[in-house]
Structures are given as C-alpha cells and as structure tokens.
Image: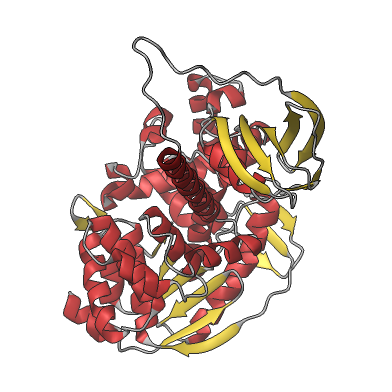
Amino acid sequence: MVGALVFSLFLSWVQVSSDTYIVKSSAGLDTAKRVLKELETFHQLLGTFAFRNTDLPELPIEVLVVSDDATMKELEPEYNGHKVQVAGFYQRGDDRDFIVLSGRSDTLTSVVYHELSHYFVSRRLASRPTWLNEGLSEYFSTAVIRDDEVTLGGIPPERLQVLKTTPLLPLKELFAVDSNSAYYNESSKVGVYYAETWAFVHYMLHGVHEVQFKEYLEALTKGDANLLRFLNTNERELENGFQNYVRTSIQVPTRKTAKVAPQGWSMDIQMIPDTDAEMSIAEIFLSNGRLAEARQHLQKLAGLAPDSSRVSYYRGVFARITGEPGAREFFVDALQDSFLGPRAAVQLVELGDWRIPTVQSTLEEAAAMGTRNPRVYLALATINTDKIREIEQTARLKKKASEPVPPLPRDTRPPAEPQLNWRKYIDGKADHVKYQVLSASDRQPEVRTVLAPYYPAELAEQKLSGEVVVDVQVTDEGKAGGVWLVSATPDLFGTLATAAVREWEFEPLPEKIRVVLQFSP
C-alpha cells in the first residue's frame, strides 16, 4: 500500500484557491477549477439560505481531488477494520477542515455539495444527530445552481427506486443509527439509510412541518433538542405522516427556488510540489486519529521537506499526542509559519515553555489581528498569570528574608485581614460584559481605557454567563500594576477577565480598587 502511494504522489498536483478554499488536485486543472467554482457558489447558497452566521475556520478549508485509486483507497474511512468505499468524505480537524473527493466520480458536483453540507452542519449545529447530518447533506446535494438562482428539492431517481423496492426502517430505528452502525457503513444496508434520511428531510422541508422543523434546526445551534416536541406530534403520527408522504407526495416534484446574491471572489492557480499533498494527507490521518498512517507520512515528509515549518508543527502535534520526545523543538521551528505560528506558540505555552523568545509576541500579534482562536487568548492569560505569580512569589521571599517573623505564642492564630468596605463609584459596560468599579477609600481613580474581555463564540452559543471579581493596584502612571483574582464563576472567565483588565488604563491616582465584571452572551 505504501509503495503504491509513493508512486501515486509522483503525479502532478495543481492548486487553485480562494480566500475560503484551497483545492489540491491530481485530476487536472479543469477539474480543480470546476470544484472550486462549485464550492464557492454552493457556499453562498448554504450561507444565505440555510446556515446563516456560520463561523468559518481561520485556515482555509483544504479540498483534495484524488485521481489515483491507491491514494483514495488509503484515505477511505474504516468500519470494523475494513475500508468503506466512498466518492468523498468530510473530515473536521483542530486547525483546518478537509474535504476529500475522488476525481474519478461521475457525480462530482453532487458529492461536492454533499460534503460541503457536512461542513456547514458541523460548524453551525452544536448537536448533530446522524440522520439529520446525512439527510441534510443528501437534500442539498441535489441542488441545481444556475447563475444567481438555486433550485432545491430535486428527486434523485436512485434514491426513489430504493424507497419503492426496500422496506423502510421505523423512524425510531432510523434516529438511533450512528456512525458506528451497520446501516451507516455496510454496503448492503447503507443505500436504504441514505435514501430514507433524504426522504425524511424532504418531508420536513416540503411537508406540513416546515416551519416547526426550521425552529428545531435553530434550537440545535445551542444544544440538544427534541424533534417531536417542536413538531407538536407523537411518534406514531409522525411515522404515519412520513409513510404516506413517501408513498404519494415525494414522487411529485415540489421544488423550491431561491435567489442567491453572487459575491465576488478570485481564483489563484499554481503548481505545487507533491509534498504539499502529502502534508494534507498526513493532517487528515492526524485529525481522524489514524496515528499509524500519520506516522508513515510524517516520517516521509521529514526526509522530503526537512525545512518545512508546517511539517515541523504537525510532527510536534504527533509527538505530543503519542508522548514521544521532541515536541518542544518541533513547535519552536514552526513559530515562523505565518498560519501555524500562533498555534505553535499556544502548544509551547501549554507545555510550560512560554519564556521562549517570540512566543508571547507571536500570540500578541495574533490577538491584535483579531484571531478567533480562543486558545490564543487563554495562552496569553496563562502567561500573564504566571508572571504575576512569579512577581508575588519573589516579593514574598524578599519580605521573608528581610523581615523575619517571630514565632507565634502557642494556641494563637494570626489575625484575620481587616474587611474593607468597598463602595461602588463607576458603572460601565463593554462587549459581552458589564462592570462596576469599587474603592474602599476616598481615592477613586477614573477608568480611562477599557479593553473588553474576549468572549469565545463557543460560550455565546451555550449562552454562558458568569461573574469575576478582581482587585487592581493602580500605579502612578495609571496602569494596572497588579491584578489579583478574587473569585470567578465559572473558572474560565477568570483568565479572560484578568488578561483584559491588565490592559486597562486609569487616572494616575495610586490606589487599590476592585472591579466586578458580569459576563453575558
């Protein structure tokens, strides 16, 4: 297998890209250009018609169009230790997402649409039942796009034939199928499963439950939801309605037409070395946990592209996953990468190596550019927290050395710190946060610059609220000379709040004050 793959990578690879997609193709330039155009057009359809406000990954989605059967076979997903033959699949990764397509498929357009639907479902819905994930992807795969008009609800003849000749699964069984089930993986059963998920979503979007089904989809953006409750029906009534729809209505075209406002995008074309495709393949194996295959490709890349910062980064990721040595050195080498440098810096902070030169500056530059990667902000908060602890520890040691404390008399305890009478003197608000500033004296420095704490999109989707209390020592220059976390509920908000308050600016009036921050989605 490896020998066949090595041979296949000597095929010429071409790359076409936009701001959102990178298509790497060994099936020729014309195929790559067609796939990119289909992706961009269909992306606009789903982004405006079905899945508005979907967060895109910061790194472009990589699409591999593979013409070589040996390479495609190696990449195919596995079930019970055996390969599952597919025309394409979607793979979500930690740093970027992938779509793999067979360049030999006769239905490349519908495969592209199907896999891109998986991408939107994965990014938009917090809860993704398997039947819904596949049903929506099957439904949108039949889209017909002409200029700025899209037609949805087409009836695939092969799916309709399956529904006519094969008994349907009861809906209770259909809803219970997951990615490990036989109906999802075995060739003798997968046909009826895909046909029925397509038919059920068609029923939801073209039948009597259309409005309630869209409300159900919106609820899934926040977490689990009960379909029957949203449809205001019971299992038996839903089963009967669906069976009747399959026997009658679904065989009569009931298509929907939508207008899509075309958005401008540009295409960049270039020939790429085989190592670029090899690196993408290695990343796919890392993303789906197939570490033995990932090791083979990373070892090969270490010899073919020893100076590649992308190769170094993923060799570091692999070493960290497997517990092998060398992760730190690989991440240091990857700091220079324009895309992966901030991620390498995050990895180093998580390994406890934040003192390495350029780690903090790399993270600060990414934050200043408005990165949507929450791990960057958490890494900066970790660095600042560690620095504060070091300063406090140094101060305690110096004080202990210069001011020896006499032994306490037996059965006595040190007096408790006096309780301060904090009084509020400022109310304010910023993005996702309201704050109060309190003082225990008549000295009440004004707040002149407020940096809103970062509030990750994941927390907004969960509608997570919280409260953080911090004490701040204002300096003669109006800076936050010290920030002490008093309490945080939940704990995550503590690091986000202290990282932001440390950048606040005040009236140059030295005083210790208290800031109470209320986070809300």
Closest to the observer: 34 or 158? 34
Residue at 66% from the left image edge and 79% from the top image edge: 266
Q: Is residue 113 above or below residue 420?
A: below
Furthest-top residue in view?
Answer: 411
Q: In which quarter of the image is residue 174?
A: top left
Colour scheme employed for the rendering of this structure = secondary structure
Seen in the image, is 230 located left or right of residue 292? right
Residue drawn at (51%, 31%) of the image: 224
Q: Position of residue 436 (x, y in %)?
A: 75, 31
Pick the front one: 422 or 84: 422
Q: Relative to 383, is 153 on the left or the right?
A: right
Residue found at x 37% / y 14%: 409
Res. 105 in view: no
Q: Can residue 375 be seen in this view?
A: yes
Viewport quadrant of the N terminus: bottom left
Q: In this view, does 79 lie above or below 74?
A: above
